Each structure stands twice: as structure tokens, then as C-alpha cells.
Image (cartoon, grey):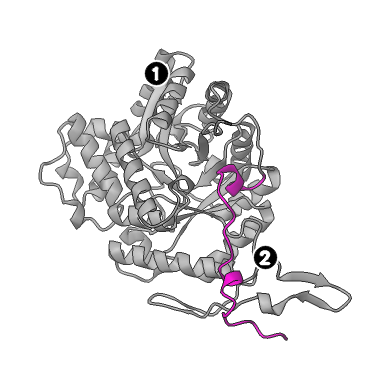
Amino acid sequence: MSSSPQRRLHLNAFLMAIGHHEAAWRLPESDANANLDIKHYISLAQTAERGKFDSVFLADSPVLFSNPERRPSGKLEPTIILTAISAATEKIGLIATASTSYNEPYNLARRFASLDFVSGGRAGWNIVTTAGADAAQNFGLDDTPAHRSRYERAAEFVEVSTKLWDSWEDDAIVADKEVAIHADSAKVHVIEHEGRFFKVRGPLNVPRSPQGYPLLVQAGSSEDGKDFAARYSEAIFTAQPTLDEGKAFYADVKDRVAKLGRDPEQVLILPGIVPVIGDTEEEARELEAELERLISPEYARKQLAQRFNLEPEQLPLDEQLPEDLPSEDEIEGAKSRYTLIVDLARREKLTVRQLIGRLGGGRGHRTFAGTPLQVADTIEYWFRNGAADGFNIMPAVLPSGLEKFVDSVVPILQERGLFRTDYTETTLRGHYGLPRPANQFAVEKDSTLVSAQ
């Protein structure tokens, strides 16, 4: 009897401009303007591809996210960056964040279908429900829509998008020059969607793309977020600072997936990890300490106070968090991250200054300073103990942190048989071992058809 193939890790490189640590730009070797340099992003993606990563990922938000006086804040539109990257790489997947709160399904479906064509089937969409009054006010709203409402809109948004991606059947284009027919009009469908949030006729003006539709990724870990992920997501980026929390999240989401009749093995969970790597443990600790010294505590305290709906003066730097913080139910934006930060501070009895230091590198994700062997051991332990299908690698400093991971950690994982030594697939879905979705209209032949012109 043949044995089943060995389970393999999935690795995604989360590219955060100059690095995930907020003070990375202040290091002597950092290019403080790399966040606006397309060559920087192309080089990072090529490094990740050299390491045989499944994908690279660019986060996004339709708002100036931080004080431009304190750190590089300019952010190029991610699908444009990924389009440039696609021309300079061959295999690595390309995932971008796009908000369901401040986009429309038709434009976004067209954008990602186009990226999938341009890249030869390597596109992925990280689905977010943007929180924060600053973002809302950029789109004519006074404040953030309610948490539950944002997720309801997101669910309908995804349903409309998948209908649009399916509005052309796979074999709709015949390109028959002899009879002068380019596409079979009976296989191009209007969708006639009319719901609570959207009214969209369709069809999309882009045929069905190489992957059918992009890999669907989600990063929310609230109750609403986990329900949404279980129903729609194929990969989940999550922040889990401890093994026990990671195992609990993993089991919870996989159980929700199974109860919805989906295959839990086709919903991959990738916690974030911020590795600070040195040839020795002492070297790694020195880099970690140097980054913490470069944090501006007053600016970081202001950011933390905004998350808690407090004034900075209510968070003395050398005291622990106040006991009377708002409850999660009183927070409308990023509920899961709020809870994660409070739990971290309470569990480890951190002062505000210490908490700022812990959050400076990973914003609540697991941070780890150590040697390549120690980083590989941590990854393997989580992977083998029911906490992860892979990892969202979030280097504290870029490009050096990614280069160090590719050159020193990846070979260890490969030697252990945990990670690929070369690509065997050409699409992002192929890298993640996920099937190409069936076209819903190819089955539902009673749908309204586009009339022949």
C-alpha cells in the first residue's frame, strides 16, 4: 500500500515596504524612500521566488495610515505593483488587499481578472472590510459602518465578484475566423444580481481568467471574520502570538469550514511570524534591541491610544494598561486585533512602553529573534502541532530580513522535507494545492444569456 504524500509547508512573503518593524527605516542601511520604488518591490519578489515561496502579499488601506512625519507613509496601489512584478517573475503568486467597503464589485473583479491574465494565473485577493473613520471620510461617510454590516456587504461583494468571474464560461471563446464567430454568445452570461448592497447586470468585460478566479484570502479573526473565512476563504492570514492560541484558532476555523460542507484541507491557515534572524542568538537579540531603541514612544503611544479610543495621557508609558478599557463590543474597527493586543498586555503584565516595543515589530503577530535553526524549529513545531498550514513571513527589515530567511532558513526546511525545492505548478492555486473552481453558469444553463449581436 502506497503512503500518502508528505504534508508540505506553504510560505507567503508579506512585503511591508522597508520592513514590518516601524523603526526599520531608521537603520543606517535602510533606504527611507524604498516604499515608493518599484525596483525595490520587484527585487523583493525575485528574492522570494528564489526561495520558492508560494506567494508575495501587499497589504493596503484607502487612507494615510500613519503620521507621515514619523515614518514613510506613502503607499502605491498594490495591483499596479503586482502587475510590474508579474513581468519580472515567472512562478510566484501575487496577492493584494482590496477593500469590500470602498470598492465596487465590477471594477474590482475586472482588476483582479486582468492581473490573473497578465501574470498567467498567479493572482490572489485578500478580502478586507476596512475599519476606521479616517477611511470612511475619504468616501463621503462620517464614520465606519457597523462591524456586522461591513461583513454582510463583504459577503455579497464576494458573491457578485464570483458571478462576474464566471460570467464567461471557460470555452466561450472559439475564435473561428472561417465563420466569423469569436465567442459563443450562449456561453457569456448576464448575472442580473440585485441584493441589499449591489445591483449588477454583467457580464464582466474580461473573459474567465486562467485560474477561473483569483485565490480568495481573508485576514479577519473576529467571530464575524471567522464565519466569513469559513464560508469563502481559501487561505487565511492570521495573527496568533502563542502556540495555544494558534491551535485554538486553527481548530475553530477548520471546524467551521467542515460544518459548512467545505473541505478543511482546502482552507489553508497561515499565521504571521516576524523573524529577526542572526547568525548567533546574540546577534539576533542585538538587532531586535536596536530596532526597539529606534521606536518613537510618544508617537507609538498616540497610535495605541487611538486603537483604545483613549487619550495618550490615559496610557502612562511605565504603567500597565488601565483596567477599565472599552470592551470588544464597544470597538467597531479591527475587533480581533484589539483583543489580541489587550490579551498580550494582560497575560505578560507589560507596561505601555513594553507593549509598544512588542507591537513595533509585528502589531500583535508572533515575533521571534534567533538563529536560522531556531526560526526553522519554531516553524516546524507550529506546523506539526496543529497550529498552521504554513506561515506569513513578515521580515522586520527589508530587504535584508527576507534575504536572510531565504538563504538560511529555507534550506533547513527543504532539508527536512517540509518545503518544496522547486516549483511544480505554474499558478497560485497550484502552489497552494487548491483546485480551479467550477463555473457556476456552466451548470446552471437556465441563466439569462447575452443575446447575439
Q: CA distance from mark 1 to mark 2?
A: 55 Å
Q: Nearer the viewer, mark 1 or mark 2?
A: 2
Which mark sits nearer the N-terminus, 1 or 2? 2
Q: Quadrant of the N terminus?
A: top right
Image point 43% across, 31% down: which residue? 383
Quarter residue 281 falls in = top left
Q: Position of residue 75 (x, y in %)?
A: 50, 50
Which label sits on residue 33? none
Pointer 1 with pointer 2, Cβ within 8 A = no
* Local crowd size for mark 1, using a 10 Å CA cut-off: few (<14), some (14–19), many (≥20): some
Q: Position of residue 297 (x, y in %)?
A: 28, 35
Q: Quadrant of the C terminus?
A: bottom right
Q: Answer with left or right where residue 422 lies relative to residue 435.
A: right
Query: Which residues, given as a range, are shown in magenta?
Result: 426-453
Q: Is residue 451 above or below residue 178?
A: below
Quarter residue 355 falls in = top left
* Local crowd size for mark 2, using a 10 Å CA cut-off: few (<14), some (14–19), many (≥20): some
